[in-house]
Image: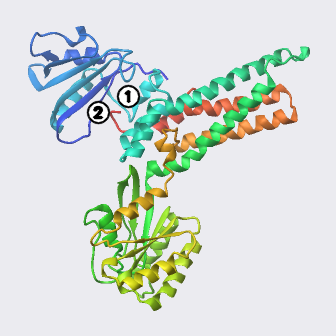
Amino acid sequence: MILEDTIVALATPSGAGAISIIRLSGPKAIEIASSSFQSIHDHKKLIDQKSHTIHLGHIVENDRILDQVLASIFRNPNSYTGEHVIEISCHGSPYIQQEIIQLFLRNGCRMADAGEFTLRAFLNGKLDLSQAEAVADLIASDNEASHQIAMQQMRGGFSNEIKNLRDELLNFASLIELELDFAEEDVEFADRTQFEALLNRIETVLKRLIDSFAVGNVIKNGIPVAIVGEPNVGKSTLLNALLNEERAIVSDIAGTTRDTIEDEISIGGIGFRFIDTAGIRDTKDVVETIGIQKTFEKIAQAQVVIFLVDSSKLHIEDLENLKNEVAQIKNKYPQKPFVIVANKIDAAAANLINALKSSLTSIEGTELKLISAKTKEGVDDLKNQLLDFVNTGTLRNNETIVTNTRHYDSLLKALEEIKKVQEGMQMGISGDLLAIDIRQALYHFGMITGEISSDDLLGNIFANFCIGK
């Protein structure tokens, strides 16, 4: 893929602001910008200036001054894209933005496609494909954990691990391929013992990376938590307490929440997406019935379930029915972390709280938390409990975590081919058959870093980027 034209786009969000940045990249970027730039101080031309310098001046068209700007110069190959790059910092008026961009378009630029600056960085060897994808993840990161993972991947942590495995495997593959040229002499260039040890090590690393996807996926997308329970037990109040804002409607009327309400907060750097659902009860209200059906759909989709009860309205004789109801939902979703939260403990009798503890803590696979959503007592303890459900050990240890579905799929396919090679080694099959499976494993490694890629693959990846990046 050869791109020899010069592209331009707004690199900052569209709309009014204090400052906007317009980015040009390509062989004529400096020439095109220089033709419309007039230095304020010494009338110097941009095209004659050194790389990594900033210049104050005006963008002009004929005798009309469009704006006073700062022009930053980055000459190839020492730029983000590996090409000549100019960044114009102008005032953030949408009118000014469009006037300057239209001027550059008339002078020989074309509008950049989505992600084209990063695509050019990849094509010019400034980033590999997994690092390029991490740029989009970094822009989309909205909590500490997703930011940390994206930074680690963009700096090459994941791709270096894959590259090292691929290089070692490629070395042995070359020796096995060489054996095929000397098949009549019956010689072995590749030490089978060392090769078997390498395959075992590759298998271990691949399994670790594949397992990390379970953590990486929820960190990247947020952990869905369904808040369920009977109507008017304080689900909306709890949601507001967790979010620390009045997001949901709070009312004494049962059945106020007739649809699901979703919002996200960060706890310990991890994103949690809380879903306040309609109350579960027998009802003849058609609209509320639809809301209850959605509640069970949300429970199925959630990764963690909070079952909320109103301890101020409970009586000792209600505990057995409550226990059965909780057990019924828990048995329907046995693999989901399940937290029973007794709300309004500030208004509950002490003997009831003790009875509640004795009754509900006996349900296997559940945690019991006592809170007051109104006064926020126990809310922090609940947040810590939710955080405990996420295996953040790999994150704290700065280990490589896979968050990208495409990478996950390639790792699974690479592991499958490695296992075929291992089985072939145990069966003593010929080197030419081993070489076929090794080539396939190398292919899947190369798909991750972009050493093997197609125009369709690149188009799909960079189409998800924002314009200007």
- Above or below residue 178? Residue 310 is below
| Label ID, residue 455 | none
96 or 327: nearer the viewer: 327
Residue 76 vs residue 197, the one in the foreground: 197
Q: Where is 198 relative to 369, above or below?
A: above
Mark 1: which amino acid? Phe
Colouring style: rainbow
Using the rendered view, name the quadrant where residue 243 is placed: bottom left
Label 1 – label 2 distance at C-alpha: 10 Å
Percent x, y of residue 358: 50, 80
Is residue 223 left or right of 256 when viewed as pictured?
Answer: right
Question: Within the image, what quadrant is residue 10 found in?
Answer: top left
Q: Estimate how packed mark 1 is, as few (under 14), some (14 to 19) or many (20 or more) residues with alpha carbons within 10 Å.
A: many
Closer to the N terminus: mark 1 or mark 2?
2
Residue 465 visible, this orientation: no
Residue at 63 percent across and 37 percent down: it is: 205
Q: What residue sits 53% from the left and 35% below the top?
A: 456
Q: Give the vertical position of 30 relative to 92 (above or below).
A: above
Which residue, as the protein is rendered here, is positioned at the far bottom?
Answer: 317
**Residue 5 % position (x, y):** 37, 20
Could you tell me which residue is drawn at 25 percent across and 29 percent down? Answer: 22
Q: Which residue is mark 2?
A: 11
Query: Which structural element holds mark 2?
Result: loop
User: As shown in the figure, which amino acid type bears the numbered disc 2?
Assistant: Ala
- Residue that label 1 marks: 117
- Decide: marks 1, 2 in contact (CB < 8 A)? yes
Q: Is residue 381 visible?
A: yes
At mark 1, the secondary structure is helix
User: Does residue 19 sit above or below 281 in this rendering?
Assistant: above
Quadrant into which the C terminus falls? top left
**Residue furthest to the top:** 48
